[in-house]
Image (cartoon, grey):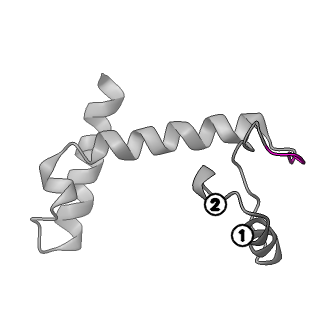
Amino acid sequence: MDSAYQGDETLQLARELGYLPVVRPNPQRLEPWEYDRILYRQRNEIERLFRRLKSYRRVFSRFDKLDVLFTGFIVLALIVEALR
């Protein structure tokens, strides 16, 4: 759940479907909800990793026809990002 979906209806639907909303509530909200700060920080790290992976043109445009080659390039990109 992202900060764009902070309406009460969306929050209720997410909880009914069994999802745990890991997003900070809007500071101007009258009844802010509790959220796990550690999970929020980890979620942010994952989102930043996906943003960096999309900088590799071969990943975001999916030039590879075979799943094995595509997965291999993602692994290679992850190794390059880990060595940074």
Magenta span has 31?
A: yes
- The magenta span reads 29-33
Q: What's the residue at 63%, 60% (across, down)?
A: 5
In the rendered image, residue 11, in percent from the top left (x then y), is placed at 76, 65
Q: What's the residue at 71%, 50% (across, down)?
A: 22
Tags 2 and 1 touching, CB below 8 Å: yes
Closer-to-camera residue (35/10): 10
Quadrant position of the C terminus in the picture: top left
Q: Which mark is residue 60?
A: none
Magenta span has 79?
A: no
Closer-to-camera residue (42/27): 27
Q: What's the residue at 74%, 70% (across, down)?
A: 14
Q: Is residue 17 left or right of residue 59?
A: right
Residue type at mark 2: give it: Tyr
- When asked about the image quadrant of residue 55, the answer is top left
- When asked about the image quadrant of residue 7, the answer is bottom right
Give the residue number, with chain letter if any, for mark 1: 10
Give the residue number, with chain letter if any, for mark 2: 5
